[in-house]
Image (cartoon, grey):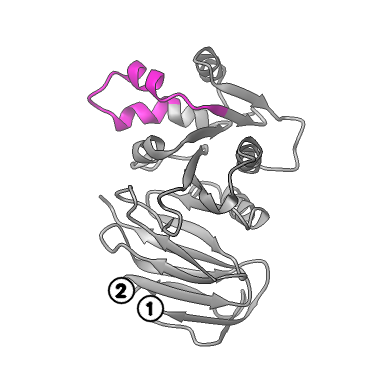
Amino acid sequence: MSVLFHSSEFLHPSSSFPAEHRRSSTYALVLLNQRLPKFTPLLWKHAQLRLCADGGANRVFDELPLLFPHLDALDVRNSHKPDVISGDMDSIRTEVLDFYAKQGTKIFDESEDEDTTDLHKCVAYILQSMPNLEESNLCILVAGALGGRFDHEIGNINVLCRFSTTRIILLSDDCLVHLLPRTHHHEIHVDSSVEGPHCGLIPIGMPSGSTTTNGLQWDLTDIEMKFGGLISSSNKVKGEKVRVQSDTDLLWTISLKKQ
């Protein structure tokens, strides 16, 4: 069984999006408290559910109007209200919380739960709010997931592992990251107009005793990868397809081109 990813379904620039369910996929967007990618308006447009993780609401309030320079800032805020704000509420500004609450945004104060990140809380909400949706048809896009504090980035990557059966893509202006579960053989479709060529494969959770790829400048053939040893960083895609097989979960990352 293979999982097929494609990068140009609707986004320029974009990330690797699953293609096998493209016609029936449901997209949810989570916005974190880091600088929003410039292509956030397109993510917003195509998402059926939009959530801000705590201080991510500040980013939407402050930064999204800047991505519509010819429109009035208040008009942008009124037309781009998140469906949900969830988290421990230690970062969102009071005036931002009040603004969106008056707009009808659902507010979930989960400050009693200090064992999970705000992204974890948002992903859990998405899965609970769509109980009849098959996980294979759901793709969660996370904007502002990379950059900033390193421990936040690691926390976001940990969410990929905690929800390994859910398709979650971490996005920034510079790159994307998603999980390649060891339970599948993967065929990644690359759109060279918006992504690449630089890419990487990183074992996560445990060393990889055997990883094999096809379609990279420096392909791996039954290679062991581990921290303290070899990992495939600063690799390059050669064409439009990359195939990956591994005995452990891997992180796939690829650069996004400036548009």
Q: Looking at the image, which residue is at 43% across and 62% down?
A: 5
Q: Looking at the image, which residue is at 44% across and 25% down?
A: 61
Image coordinates for residue 26, horizontal then vertical, percent: 48, 44
Q: Is residue 213 above or below residue 15?
A: below
Q: Quadrant of residue 190?
A: bottom left
Residue type at tag 1: Gly
Residue placed most toward the observer, 177 or 244:
244
Secondary element at tag 1: loop
Q: Is residue 3 above or below residue 9?
A: below
Taking the image as shown, residue 213 lies to the left or right of residue 215, namely right
Residue placed most toward the observer, 150 or 113:
113
Q: For residue 65: magenta? A: yes
Range drawn in magenta: 61-84
Q: For residue 218: magenta? A: no
Image coordinates for residue 135, horizontal then vertical, percent: 59, 50
Res 215 label:
1
Res 239 label:
2
Dot 1, crowdedness within 10 Å: few (<14), some or many (≥20)? some
Q: Is residue 195 above or below residue 243?
A: above
Per the model, the C-alpha gap separating discs 2 and 1 is 6 Å
Secondary element at tag 2: loop
Q: In which quadrant of the rendered image does the N terminus lie?
A: bottom right
Q: Looking at the image, which residue is at 51% across and 58% down?
A: 178
Whether pointer 2 and pointer 1 mark residues with C-beta atoms closer than 8 Å, the reply is: yes
